[in-house]
């Protein structure tokens, strides 16, 4: 007995030494909590890659990390002796409710009691409206932030004129949101125009500092019309905007006189058998007030075109089976535009100098990763900031003429010494058998191909977004690391319908949202089934917003594919979603009843087999609670059993530290229902 005990002790010690040898590197790593990984976490800021406070003050390069800010020589990257900028001294007094300050004139537009006001540089105030309310909205974003709209006031180049939106939403139905934080709950309604129902009416006003008067553009009856992408002519005499019909299949670029409000001309039109979507205002050439650049995807990809103020087409500036992402600005000295495109690779964003005469493009970065650019006022230099899959962040100052760089900096890995999963990227074919789709996979740090792992598919899947790119960790969300640390594999696939792959790639979903996307996601599931280390019996799925719609759709359309799902803020039926987004992709419920029926999760509630948790903000103004509540009702009637959690007072996403609570809840649901295996306890 003693000998056997000694033998067993030696075997145990030997096994322990082997385990320490093979997993020592793992134990040496600190483990993350969501306080470190989630953006709302108490310690999260320590784990973001370093950011440098480089910016332009006109043509001067400033390092705002020091006080006063240092002025940097853009050629050498060195501080200029004796030159500093006191940024605090440049701060101006601000009006409460300020909307937009104009540097050219020193005037500021601001809101007071729902009405729009302007104060000039001397402090003289002008009241532009008197009927402002929650129903009559001035100077704010309209059309529910669609069509590239993100604000509602627009100063002319010289700062003497202010264009602004006026939105009458008195005819729009109230959605009865409730404030439960009062002693007795009170109504806190939102104006919410649902697909196929009455929408608001928008007009555009122009206020003159010189006359103190306001005129409105002669738009005619604004019913069922959208106005977007407001742009000023350099001389301030003409205002340009795009108009879009409610069907969103026809758009015009129109010019208006800023003194009379009279329509001068329509410069161009564009139509589609599906939809058109103007997202960018025209941009005038700084060296020629008679020519401007406009955007279109009429050749199948989003590109830049040149036109004169008479509407004469002057040629396509960029072309190819890739999209332009951004028109950063211009370099007048070289008569070129600085642009960011996807031509170097579908997963990349790179900076180019575009010669507007020859149309030749010159790469201004390293040709890898995902880049952004800040351009100096004269366009001669830019601050290039980028990430690569193994580069947390880097930056350089680039001469846009010569391409030479200075002030190169690379951030240290903020996760050094902490848990580091394995990040991989690859491709599969879409359900059409032709289109390449990109995926990301996150594996545990101690990944063992001989084991089988529970696997979670994270999905968004909708337009104007993508998940996989050549940024740090292939664009991985930090929650994926948290899950990998707990022993899961994460799989993320950008299906057809997502952004930056061209018109046909995105519009394949028209009138039947979710259907082609699900087919592609199921191709991803087939790929996972082919991997010996993926436990096909323990597949989960999670997504938020459009991803919540995808999660619920997948769980009820392919009920045997996923064991567990967590759907956040999901669309359940597109007839309860808002007019502009919903009708662009689905038409109205009256025009497309079959499509609305096909895409609704209500009739599929009876199919639910796996464990599904739905999580929403109780006061979500984007995807209203009616979606989830009606799905719960359908499940109750069908006898299926989803779970439900709600955050009182929260909107479409959980703000601040509640995001930590949210992601712990999501994680725990997979821990409770996806991870466990049947354990044999027999001696």
Image (cartoon, helix red, strand yellow):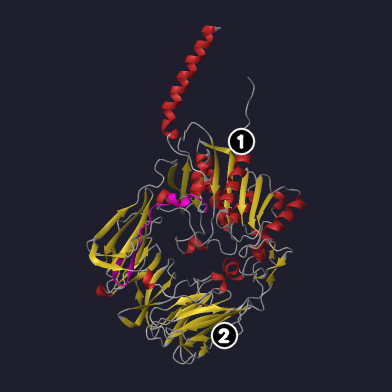
Q: Secondary structure at mark 1?
A: loop
Question: Label 1, on which residue?
Answer: 676
Q: Which residues are magenta?
A: 40-62
Residue 534: x percent and y percent?
A: 53, 38
Query: Can the viewer see residue 244 in this picture?
Result: yes
The disc placed on residue 111 is: none
Q: Nearer the viewer, residue 264 or 161?
A: 161
- Specify few, some or many for label 2: CA neighbours under 10 Å numbering under 14, 14-19, or 20 or more: some
Question: Label 2, on which residue?
Answer: 129
* For residue 145, side relative to residue 600 (left or right): left
Location of residue 358 by image quarter: bottom left
Residue 224: x percent and y percent?
A: 60, 78
**Vertical relation: 57 (above or below) 22:** below
**Vertical relation: 391 (above or below) 683:** below
- Quarter containing the N terminus: top right
Q: Could you give the CA–CA distance between mark 1 and mark 2, rounded to whole angstroms? A: 62 Å
- Specify few, some or many for label 1: CA neighbours under 10 Å numbering under 14, 14-19, or 20 or more: few
Query: Can the viewer see residue 242 in this picture?
Result: no
Residue 26: x percent and y percent?
A: 44, 34
* For residue 331, side relative to residue 22 (left or right): left
Residue 17: x percent and y percent?
A: 44, 22
Q: Nearer the viewer, residue 485 or 113?
A: 113
- Between disc 1 and disc 2, the foreground one is 2
């Amino acid at each position: 007995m003693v000998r056997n005990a000694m033998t067993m002790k030696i075997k145990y010690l030997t096994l322990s030494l082997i385990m320490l040898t093979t997993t020592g590197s793992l134990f040496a790593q600190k483990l993350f909590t969501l306080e470190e990984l989630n953006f709302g976490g108490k310690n999260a800021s320590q784990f973001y890659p370093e950011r440098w406070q480089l910016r332009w003050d006109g043509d001067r390069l400033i390092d705002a990390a020091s006080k006063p800010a240092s002025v940097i020589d853009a050629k050498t990257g060195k501080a200029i002796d004796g030159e500093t900028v006191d940024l605090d001294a440049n701060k101006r007094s601000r009006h409460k409710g300020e909307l937009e300050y104009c540097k050219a004139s020193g005037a500021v537009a601001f809101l007071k009691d729902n009405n729009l006001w302007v104060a000039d540089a001397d402090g003289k105030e002008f009241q532009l409206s008197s009927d402002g309310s929650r129903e009559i909205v001035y100077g704010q974003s309209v059309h529910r932030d669609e069509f590239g709209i993100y604000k509602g006031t627009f100063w002319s180049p010289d700062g003497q004129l202010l264009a602004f939106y006026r939105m009458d939403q008195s005819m729009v139905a109230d959605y009865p949101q409730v404030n439960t934080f009062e002693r007795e709950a009170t109504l806190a309604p939102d104006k919410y125009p649902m697909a196929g129902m009455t929408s608001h009416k928008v007009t555009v006003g122009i206020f003159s500092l010189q006359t103190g008067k306001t005129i409105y553009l002669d738009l005619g009856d604004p019913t069922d019309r959208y106005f977007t992408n407001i742009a000023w002519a350099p001389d301030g005499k003409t205002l340009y905007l795009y108009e879009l019909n409610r069907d969103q299949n026809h758009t015009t670029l129109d010019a208006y006189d800023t003194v009379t409000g009279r329509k001068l001309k329509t410069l161009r039109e564009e139509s589609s058998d599906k939809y058109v979507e103007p997202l960018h205002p025209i941009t005038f050439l700084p060296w020629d007030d008679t020519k401007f650049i406009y955007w279109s995807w009429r050749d199948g990809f989003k590109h830049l075109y040149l036109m004169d103020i008479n509407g004469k087409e002057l040629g396509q500036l960029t072309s190819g089976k890739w999209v332009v992402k951004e028109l950063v600005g211009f370099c007048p000295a070289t008569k070129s535009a600085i642009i960011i495109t996807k031509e170097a690779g579908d997963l990349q964003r790179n900076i180019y100098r575009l010669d507007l005469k020859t149309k030749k493009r010159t790469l201004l970065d390293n040709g890898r990763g995902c880049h952004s650019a800040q351009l100096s006022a004269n366009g001669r230099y830019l601050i290039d900031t980028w990430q690569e899959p193994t580069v947390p962040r880097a930056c350089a100052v680039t001469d846009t003429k010569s391409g030479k760089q200075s002030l190169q900096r690379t951030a240290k890995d903020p996760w050094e010494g902490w848990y580091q999963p394995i990040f991989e990227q690859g491709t599969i074919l879409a359900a059409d058998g032709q289109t390449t789709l990109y995926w990301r996979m996150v594996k545990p740090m101690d990944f063992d191909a001989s084991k089988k792992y529970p696997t979670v598919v994270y999905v968004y899947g909708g337009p104007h977004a993508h998940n996989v790119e050549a940024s740090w960790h292939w664009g991985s969300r930090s929650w994926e690391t948290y899950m990998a640390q707990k022993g899961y594999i994460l799989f993320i696939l950008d299906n057809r319908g997502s952004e930056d792959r061209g018109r046909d790639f995105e519009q394949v979903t028209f009138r039947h949202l979710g259907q082609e996307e699900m087919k592609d996601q199921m191709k991803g599931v087939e790929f996972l089934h082919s991997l010996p280390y993926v436990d096909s019996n323990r597949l989960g799925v999670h997504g938020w917003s459009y991803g919540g719609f995808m999660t619920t759709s997948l769980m009820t359309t392919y009920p045997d594919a996923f064991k567990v799902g967590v759907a956040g803020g999901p669309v359940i039926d597109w007839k309860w979603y808002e007019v502009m987004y919903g009708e662009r992709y689905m038409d109205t419920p009256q025009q497309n009843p079959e499509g609305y029926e096909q895409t609704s999760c209500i009739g599929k509630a009876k199919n639910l087999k796996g464990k599904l948790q739905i999580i929403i903000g109780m006061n979500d103004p984007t995807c209203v609670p009616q979606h989830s509540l009606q799905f719960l009702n359908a499940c109750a009637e069908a006898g299926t059993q989803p779970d439900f959690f709600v955050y009182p007072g929260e909107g479409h996403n959980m703000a601040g530290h509640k995001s930590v609570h949210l992601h712990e809840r999501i994680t725990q649901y997979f821990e409770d229902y996806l991870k466990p295996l049947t354990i044999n306890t027999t001696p």
